Image (tube, rainbow, N blue to C red):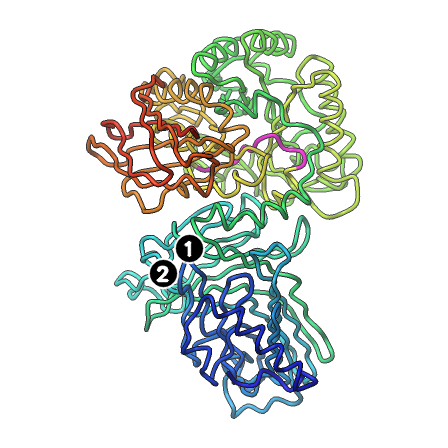
Amino acid sequence: MKALSTQIDSPMKTLIVAILLLLNTAAFGDPALRSDPAVVVATLNGLQITIDSNSGSILKLAFPGAGKMLDSLPDRASIIDLAYPVNAFEPLRLASRYSANASITARADSLTIHWAKLGPSRTNFPVAGNVSATVRFSAHPDGRSVIMTALVENNSDNDVRQVIFPDFAGLLPFAGEHGTWFRTGGFAGLPFPELARTEDRESTQYMTDAASYSVEHKSGGMFNDMFVRWMDFGGLGGGISLFPRRWGFDPPVTIRLQRSEVETKLRLLSLNETTLKQGGKWESGEWVLTPHRQGWAKGIEAYREWVNQHFRREFPVPRHVREGIGYRTAWMCQNQPNDPRDAVFKLSDLPALARECADHGIDEMVLWAWNKGFVLPLPGPYPHLGTEPEMVEAIRECRKLGVNVAPFISVLQANPETAPRYGLKVSNNNGWTYHTELVPKWNPNYASGFSCVQVGPGNKLWHDDVLAGAKHLVDTGITSLSWDQFWTTPGPEPNMISLARDIRACARAADPESTFSGEELWNIEIDSAVLDYTWDWGGYKDCRAFTSVFPAPRVNCCVSSSALAAKKAFADNLYLNVFPRKAESINGSDWIAHQPELSQALKQCAKLKKQFLSYFTEGRLLGDCLFTTPCPATHVCAYALPDRAILVLINLSPRRQKISFDVDLAPWTRSASGRYQARQYTPEGQLASTALIPAKWRGRTQMLAPEGLQVIEFLAR
């Protein structure tokens, strides 16, 4: 192996470090690499890292079980990359791949790479001075992860305008192109087929992301697709998880994935926009890289520990929200009180709606358009829907039926009449004007009935007005609220969180089981402190990673008619937002009974949720990670308790079939004998068969209809 660094200060120390490094890598890795002077190989907590000894870029990453995950040629490899625009050539970059004479220090528990002068992508544009960088890998004390950090120092006459770190170029489809997933808190995708070169992309403007085989994802909240800063790349046999040690209002992350056009490899990079002037320094903070065997549910363990250190609830989640399958949204009208046909439901209809909810296992109901939005002080219900006393009585009747009611309020914005109260003015028609008879239905240029301007969340008078309105509702017996646009900001109190805290404290004093939900926007880590569940637009999405880590809020899935969407949401422990729609009307305008397939699915899911409740409320969500091989045309979500587990399977095939699958229970549950009892249940929850099985088992479901659902339970024996 090449001498690691001139920084090692004695021959004896050099020998000791070399021996330790060889012992660390002997158990795993390519022997040819260990003797190649062109590379430096280190193994930290099982992750083998191969570095180009000249440029300092990552050439290979490998881990037992997952195997080789990254394999790059020196001229395509990377680890850190900077934008360094000069007048003569704005695209100029400084990066490890363009550099030489990197100084590499390898020890038993760390690997440090230093570039005294990062090399430019073009040599005919002189760099006055130098930009240096240091990247360090160190073994995490948890024994399974690696900590990555970077430092950039600009000692040149030009600004650094962007830092890419970490930068993994050459990721392989090591679980197959259709089995290697990129997963985050808010979605999961197959980047290799999704970013493949196609004729459609070729026929569009090349420089757009859609045409250049790249995609960008952002963290923050439910208005960004990642939700949180965690991600995983891999398959059922293993992979690598990654997150920065940041929380709350710390900088979010922007991740880009780019598929190579010349080889079947992927680049995964973190994009950091910055302006680093002469003498300036940029530090990445710590990134935690966790290689893992099995699926993403193993890789997320280090992130779960990070979340547990920071997650704080202001109030416990009400029991019925924690245990329920979801809520119903009733859209009361289209905000046109002068129209005799405007009312969809009247307040007197609420008990009948609640009765139907209870028949379908739904114990929460949200009311939209029950009063005029963007008005403060908070107005009472629209007169054409009923009076406030009628609303109070109707909600009281709903609660007797076991259904809690949460009116939805829109007060973050102010209309032209309310805005002057806060020293503001609505200066254009921008707003939320909608109606099924408008053309287009949303914000046509001739309609401005709901134009508005944002007031909250930092305005003290606004804070007091909203709190007064909420207290008035609590005084009448209406203790739960759902919030339009939950807009958290890092400013001092009063802010969105302090307002939510004040509303909740008032409501819980009157009703300890009162709920507070909202349209989560930009910072789910902060909002998780006060939201019990979310009211966000959008149908089913794969949020299993988020749900497996965050106890709250329960993420909603909007369902208007699809029985399959309802079953998938149930399987993943999402919180259903059921709002069936009449033809050519608005969402939430119909009765559940008018959607018979959805109605049947809700009843089935509610029964199964109650039957297997402890798995959903106390178990560890594993997604598909109980499987050892992919199971095509199937949606699956597993849950594990210490000595038992369940699989919820849904047949996605258009034909009736028995689904075969391979599981390994040993990594997730304990059995002294190594044996388990497998219990198969009918879609109605009746026990159909039992069998004594080993931890590794090839099973088969009963005959399932298209979109049919089955639960299989495994008990340690």
Task: Give x and y (percent) for residue 463.
Answer: 76, 34
Residue 466 percent coordinates (x, y): 73, 29
Q: Amino acid at mark 1?
A: Gly
Q: Quadrant of residue 714?
A: top left
Q: How many marks?
A: 2
**Earlier along the polypeptide chain: callout 1 or callout 2?**
2
Label 1, on which residue?
234
Q: Secondary structure at mark 2?
A: loop
| Residue 480 x %, y % | 64, 21
Q: Which residue is mark 2?
A: 174
* CB atoms of marks 1 and 2 within 8 Å: yes
Residue 346 lies, with reference to residue 446, above or below; the image says above
Give the residue at x 41% y 72%: 30
Is 530 magenta? The answer is: yes
Residue occupying the point 19% across, 33% down: 655
Of the pair 407 and 171, the residue shown nearer to us: 171
Per the image, is 209 magenta?
Answer: no
The answer to whether residue 668 is above or below residue 360 is below
Residue at (75, 19) in percent of width and height: 509
Residue 638 is left or right of residue 272, and the answer is left
